[in-house]
Amino acid sequence: MSMPKKSILVCVAFAWGACAEVLEAHDDGFVSAHEIAIEATPSRVFEALVDEVDRWWDPAHSYSGDAANFSLDTVCGLCESVDAGSGLVRHMRVDVWRPGKSIVLAGGLGPLQRLGVAGSMSFDLEATATGTRVTYRYTVNGRNVGPWAEPVDRVQHGQLLRLKRFVETGSAVAE
């Protein structure tokens, strides 16, 4: 059964200022986008995004159950150590690495990983008067992936909020 093409817009005007949107969802793919304001410089946000992924990543969205097993670099990409360090899960590879400006990752996260999807996830950082605007976009193409649009979008929005909290307060966990 073919899923109709649809657009969903969810903008949240809380103190953390975030806008999330499933721009497109259909049988063969989806596009989700988020924009979030973080009160820190683009270089600090980039540093936290890549060098401290283990401190803000939600361990509920991991194979090992421990965010301390995550790393993000240009060689491995977004990787997770599993099986007491004897194994490895490469979640995504790095296609673009521009410190303080942008990063583009390729692949499928979580349940998408075994579906053979083609995915491109980008984070663009722009300095603002109060910090950094992070513009996130995840484009996923593959067979029968449309139903995953909203759940993936929800998880990724949560991850971005954890990143924001971590950068601004030192803790990714909401109080």
Image: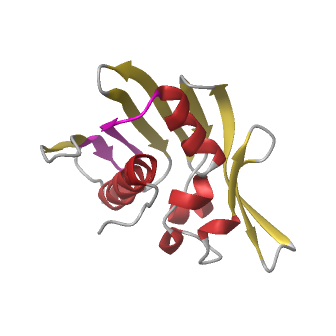
Percent position of residue 163, x then y: 44, 50
- Residue drawn at x 40%, y 56% is 162
The quadrant where residue 62 appears: bottom right
| Residue 47 lies in the magenta stretch | no
Q: Which residue reaches farthest right?
A: 86
User: Is residue 67 shown above or below 129?
Assistant: below
- Residue drawn at x 81%, y 80% is 84
The quadrant where residue 173 appears: bottom left
Q: Nearer the viewer, residue 172 or 12?
A: 172
Q: Nearer the viewer, residue 90 or 4?
A: 90
Percent position of residue 40, x then y: 41, 34
Q: Nearer the viewer, residue 21 or 144?
A: 21
20 relative position to 83: left or right: left
- Residue drawn at x 60%, y 67% is 67
Q: Is residue 64 visible?
A: yes
Q: Quadrant of the N terminus?
A: bottom left
Q: Main secondary structure of the magenta part?
A: strand
User: Is residue 3 shown above or below 29?
Assistant: below
| Residue 32 lies in the magenta stretch | yes
95 relative position to 61: left or right: right
Q: Which residues are magenta?
A: 20-41
Q: Is residue 116 visible?
A: no
The way the protein has been coloured in the rendering is secondary structure
Percent position of residue 142, x then y: 50, 48
Q: Which residue reaches farthest front?
A: 169
User: Disc count in the image?
Assistant: 0
Percent position of residue 11, x then y: 15, 43
The quadrant where residue 158 appears: bottom left
9 relative position to 44: left or right: left
